[in-house]
Amino acid sequence: MTIAIDRPTTRVNSVKKAEPVVVENPLPSRIAGTVPTMAPSAAAHLTPEQLDALAAELDAIRDEVLGGLGESDARYIHNVIKLQRSLEIAGRGALIFSLNPAAWVAGTAALSVAKILDNMEIGHNVLHGQWDWMKDPKIHSTTWEWDHASTSKAWQKSHNYEHHTFTNVRGKDRDLGYAVMRVTPEQPWKPIDLIQPLTNFGLSLVFEWGIAIYDIELEKVQEGTKPWSQAKQELKALWRKTRRQLAKDYVLFPLLSGPGFVQTAAANLTANTVRNIWSHAVIFCGHFPDGTETFEESRLENETQGEWYVRQMLGSANLTGSPTFHLMTGNLSHQIEHHLFPDVPSNHYAKIAPRVREICDRYGLPYTAGPLPKQYFKVLRKIFRYAFPGGAPKTA
Amino acid sequence: MGVLGAIGRQAYTAAGWLTQPLLPDDLLGTLNPMWSASEPHARVVGLRRETADTTTLLLKPGRARTRHVPGQFVGVGVRLDGVWHWRTYSATSRPADDLLAVTVTAIPGGAVSGELAHRTPVGTVLRLGPPAGEFVLPQPVPEKLLFVTAGSGITPVMGMLRELAATRPDALDGAVLVHCDRTPRDVVFGLELRALAASTGLRLVERHTALEGRLSPDALGDCVPDWAARQAWICGPAGMLDDLTAHWERSGDPDALHVERFVPPAFAGDSAGGTVSFTTSGIAAEAGPGTPLMVAGEAAGAVLPNGCRMGICHTCVGRLRSGAVRDLNTGELYDTPGDTVRTCVSGAAGDVEIEL
């Protein structure tokens, strides 16, 4: 096993600053990592043997969970799907009477929760293949489609593959700032970054559309690394899906409400926006709060399983809260566990979290976790800070 | 009906705009699985214990049921510990019957057949596949029929016999059924077969292999001297079918022989490697032991969906059409057609076809 990058084997404080690595990069400068890492990694003290041992421990947890999957898990996802569909039917039913303020509020609330469950606990996790083991073609990563602007196929490529494989690797993980923001000091500053707090707020309101457009990688087309013909095909596929989504929320169901057309359209817009703001907050808290690391592309070369696990853990942050809160985040509140085991059913993350945390403690690795408002504040602070040039990371 | 059907289809399309990205059928299926047309279900409404190891399940299908032709089999899906397992069983009821009967013999060590034969109570909801199979009688029904069956091989023939007895009893007059099983107690449908023989003129030859041994071609000739002049339908263990097929090829008319085999897909047993054929691209490649299908395919020039190449992202999945693959991480074997296979972490266990 050869490791291409310099891996210090002593304690952090004796680590030499790594030589700048210039990576030839086909990606546009916004997401390309041309500046070397400024801080030593929190995992710098681990030896290759320790990394192998860590990988074995995490593999064992994964095998244990996958080996124990059974009827109660199947019932769980069926129940969540039933709950989501019931809420959606109830919400849309109530909104037929959207002229009545009580019906409007109840319907909008039910529909908002339904859309959040559809995207977070059901869609995201089914599309990861977490439930493929049931061999049920109705609940399967290859057949699932969700209530979201982005098509399942486009999402699986940008999220399951690019984001989960290259998590927090600058220049490879486009989720680092989503191609429109500067979220680490290593990303080069551009004047447009000055308005990124505003960009972030705008993005949170229309997050599903942001993701749908983002999946088409227009910045690559601009830079000439992706043919326009391909982007056009993808835009057409997106339009085929989104026109139905738009028609459903803003024409057909409003028409069913008769004189309540405008009220129902407004309710649907509200539900979509609530879902957008919520998923944006949860997702941004998964990788950007203080304590999460980003990595250089050179690290990927000959990366061992142990190093891969460490990158997933150091690049992710958890959210603390109640079981209902975890459900509403699609268990992305267990972002660390999700990134270690993206295809392990989400209902198991809470159960394995204490064990992962204990492993982190034992190996001297940080395990970042906090309540949503606190973590979101840290994300916002970062977005404001990196709107301006510079911004070396804080050292403990 | 034409107009109503057209209106119904229009209404369904319109409802699809309201339920998308789901289909109205998905919502119906969520409310009650029996209402789903795209994933048909059936409820077990009765059980008949045929012998110690064989049970007939009487199924009430939900919506949309395709009627079988006697002799055909149907797919039966059962959820065991959260996982859907599919097996095929011959339909033993008549097509016109309200209930669909499938007769299941528990195979020693068979998790699914054992569950269905012994541990499936009335009320259980199963999934139902469409009827299929070429082991059927032609129309018009030939004059001189011969059936040779052994063990659970009687099940597709029972479907034919019941249909003939109800619609064309004269066709059974002069027909011969040679049926083998270990002892009289093991004969599935024994009482009914004997009664059928008495009432229609069907000649029933029961052969009890515990005493008389396996049916050889010579023994068949002894009890049915005019076997070569008959149209024959045979079903039973592979050894018997092989012997009889060779016999018909040697001394009879192979076109007059119709064979139904209950054999699982052949696989090498280990991640021994084999030829992987990608059915969409038409590319075939040799996958050596321990070589992922994706690596083998790419070496042969196939452009396959791929992502993480480590088994986590499920970008590369393709459906298994035939053969078997082994998960190179867990060693688990997948050999059910329709199984989804992650090509980046699966090796060939014998020759395999993947729908990619």
Image (cartoon, coloured by chain):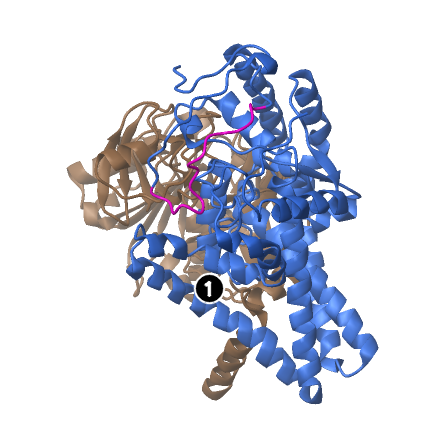
Judging by the rendered image, the residue that carries numbered circle 1 is B67
Q: Is residue B149 left or right of residue A202?
A: left
Looking at the picture, which amino acid does disc 1 mark? Arg
- Per the image, is A258 magenta? no
Residue A325 visible at all: yes
SS at mark 1 in the image: loop
Residue depicted at x 79% and y 72% = A105
Q: Is residue B157 above or below residue A99?
A: above
Q: Colour of chain B?
A: brown
Residue depicted at x 62% and y 55% = A197
Of A249 and B108, nearer the camera is: A249
Residue B37 location (% of width, % of height): 53, 65
Q: Main secondary structure of the magenta part?
A: loop
Q: Is residue B218 left or right of residue A355?
A: left
To which chain does the residue with label 1 belong?
Answer: B
Q: Which chain is blue?
A: A
Furthest residue toward right: A102
Q: Give the magenta-colored segment's residue range.
A: A26-41
Q: Is residue B285 above or below residue A273?
A: above
Quarter of the rendering occupied by the C terminus of chain A: top right
Residues packed near mark 1 inside 10 Å, few (<14), some (14 to 19) or many (20 plus): few
Residue A116 location (% of width, % of height): 67, 57
- Per the image, is A33 magenta? yes
